[in-house]
Amino acid sequence: MKLSSCGKSFPNKTVEQNAIIKEYTLIMIAVLLLTCVISIIVWVNSPATTFFFLTQNAYGIATDNGPSIPKAFLVYSNQRYEMTPFVHFDGKYMNKLIYPSADVTPLLTVQEGDKINVDFDENPVSVKAYIADYEADIPSLHALKELPDNNFELSGVQGLWNIEVHAVFSNHNGLGSSYIDNKSAVNSSTNPSYRYVSYELGVDMMPMTFTKNTNEIGRNTCANNDIGIAKVSTPGGQLEHPGSINYHLATNYKNNSINRVSIESIKGNSLYIIDLGQETPICSLKLKFSNGDKVVNHFNIQTSIDGNYFSEPIYYDNTAAVSGEESYDISSDYPITTRYVKITFEGNTQGNVYAPLQVRVLGNN
């Protein structure tokens, strides 16, 4: 009898347990559905997560967390190629998205002498374009000739390089009462809301179609030797105080003059004139900002034979990729003979005061 009684009660308990399990299952499904609905509402109406925020910023998608990074496109032979942003100053903070690649993977083949255009999804205040080399120990920039409407002429040594574009943008509300000219000083003091972005794109630079003659090939050779510096002066012609310029960093045994100077403090919109002592073929200038990996510094370079009439300025920014030296080409074709080199400082992303700066002139001696 006990066995029969147990046999009858077992199915009742099973049915009761199944009902409880089914009830819990329905509750769990309801909770999951409610969670999904809430997640969708939050995703649509709330700021993106950190991952999506970084991704969206890197590709120019606006978010509620601040202004997006504008997209940049290199236009060549009627084809558009999206460039990769790697440094972004949002008006307050410097953001390094990636390090520029030393191992260039070219997305297109270009030819020296051809024209490129840089297009943006937001109107820039100023645009500069360079051929950049990060493979060497010292990163180098070669300025491309600027043409109207953000067009540039390709020049430089053939090979695999990055085309690098530096662009300044106003805030999304416009520049307000302060108009920033393409050739004037642009910094966080003249316009606290300005934004800066560096972009890159790998290319394979082919030489010009015509063959250069022997004289042109010889002129195009740059030895990149340190050139002696006789003195450094301000616009008024006064020799800088020894406390401002450090003359004992290095000496040139050949002509007993220095070949490297260190300027302790520089104010924005100021300039320094380097006197080489004699007419000398030069190729590039090497600058070392002590805050070079944290701040983008704006400056231009000019040359002169007599110290009175100077060449058209070549506009540069340091890359903010390294804290050490960077090289900036002075001539796009071959070493140029000059005696005076003028550097004009135009402010930076931190304001208009620079940390100590070290200068070297390179060429053929």
Image (cartoon, rainbow, N blue to C red):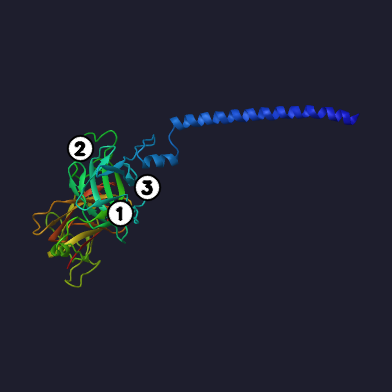
Q: Quadrant of the N terminus?
A: top right
Comes first in the chain, label 2 or label 3:
3
Q: Which residue is mark 1?
A: 292
Q: Position of residue 253 (x, y in %)?
A: 20, 73
Q: Quadrant of residue 185?
A: top left
Report the Cα–Cα distance between label 3 and label 1. Answer: 16 Å
Comes first in the chain, label 3 or label 1:
3
Compared across the picture, whether 18 is left or right of 298 comes to: right
Report the Cα–Cα distance between label 2 and label 3. Answer: 29 Å
Report the Cα–Cα distance between label 1 and label 2. Answer: 27 Å
Mark 3: give few (<14), some (14-19) or many (20+) Cα within 10 Å.
some
Point out the residue furthest to the bottom here.
253
Say which amino acid is labelled 3.
Leu
Q: Quadrant of residue 230?
A: bottom left
The number of callouts visible is 3
Compared across the picture, whether 334 is left or right of 66 comes to: left
**In percent of the image, x 25 and y 42: which residue is there?**
78
Which of the pair 149/342 is nearer the observer? 149
Comes first in the chain, label 1 or label 2:
2
SS at mark 1 in the image: loop
Residue 97: which disc?
Answer: 3
Q: Which residue is mark 2?
A: 179
Compared across the picture, whether 250 is left or right of 233 comes to: right
Compared across the picture, whether 17 is left or right of 36 comes to: right
Q: Disc 3, disc 1: CB below 8 Å?
A: no
Which of the pair 173/152 is nearer the observer? 152
Q: Is residue 56 visible in this depiction of the protein?
A: yes
Q: For marks 3 and 1, give the one nearer the viewer.
A: 3
SS at mark 2 in the image: loop
**In percent of the image, x 21 and y 43: which residue is there?**
150
Which of the pair 117/59 is nearer the observer? 117
Say which amino acid is labelled 2.
Tyr
